[in-house]
Image (cartoon, rainbow, N blue to C red):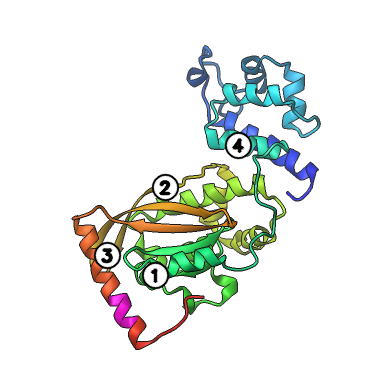
Amino acid sequence: MSTSGGRAKELGTFLRTRRGSLTPHQVGLPDTGAPRRVPGLRREEVARLASISTDYYTRIEQGRMPASAPVLESLTRALHLTTDQRTYLLGLAGRPPAEPPAGATSGLGEHNRRLLAQLDASPAVVITAATDVLAWNPLAATLLTDFGRFPEAERNFVWLLFNDPVLRSRYEDWTDAALACVAYLRMHTARRPDDPRLLRLLARMAGHADFQHWWQAREVAVHGSGSKRFRHPLTGGLDLDWDTLTSSTAPDQHIIVWSAAPGSVSERGLRVLAAHAAERTAREPAPAT
């Protein structure tokens, strides 16, 4: 998807996927009950909902004609797109929101390095938009996985989530975590279709059946915060909230921080892991980068 033609093709595929996921009843159209050759809405139904001609919509879906901004908004409403799906659609059409320049991540930002060093009660990692792991604190290595065990080329959160049995086992609902990561990456392709880190990751994930299945579903989402349940052999279940922090001096780098509700069992569990991480660091001092 590195050319304008590739984007147009992906835009058409995305539109087909979205209309294929809807029923006439969901968009307020009468359903006659007549058999349909394909699931979901027909092209003429989408065109009617978007107030454009069927020929115009067909050309857009086939990548033979660009869509104007008003038409994109009409398609957003017609296909009941979420905010993230709309952003993805606009990115494919060449109208993405402002982004930091590609390749902005050349190393760990000094502010992020300092903040990470000062976080000792919360697990934290620094990742790029393509989910490359740039740095982590000892508590994150204890909670998730020892990122230092892997060569730098393999320190990608999505790659490890699918291929590292330790990280995979830490998530009580691994499928939910994996789906969220795939949706985030799919969103990133609209913003940065030529990102070499992303292209390398996609090439490496080509043989993973689950990843490919979810990737082709074209679900898109960006979440800056949320909650996940972890399971660790030292503490059992941990209910942790996560937040994304972005520095203005390194906008292509994000710090993911996990925390627990004050006074909760999970907070006590984090203290246990923090003590274990401190003991391990004292025994085997090693830099996190």
Tell me, for residue 10, which label it has, or none: none
- Is 199 left, or right, of 80 in this rendering? right
Disc 2: CA contacts within 10 A as few (<14), some (14-19) or many (>=20): few
Q: Amino acid at mark 3?
A: Leu
| Residue 234 in view here | no
Q: Is residue 78 magenta?
A: no
N-term-proximal mark, 3 vs 4: 4
At horizontal 35% and vertical 70% (from top left) the residue drawn is: 139
Q: Amino acid at mark 4?
A: Thr
N-term-proximal mark, 3 vs 2: 2
N-term-proximal mark, 1 vs 3: 1
Q: Determine whether 168 is above or below 13 in the image.
A: below
Q: Amino acid at mark 1?
A: Val
Give x and y (percent) for residue 233. 26, 70
N-term-proximal mark, 4 vs 1: 4
| Residue 111 in view here | yes
Residue on which disc 4 sits = 87
Give x and y (percent) for residue 140. 39, 68
Tell me, for residue 270, which label it has, or none: 3
Secondary structure found at label 1: helix
Foreground tag (1 vs 3): 3
Disc 3: CA contacts within 10 A as few (<14), some (14-19) or many (>=20): many
Tell me, for residue 166, which label it has, or none: 1
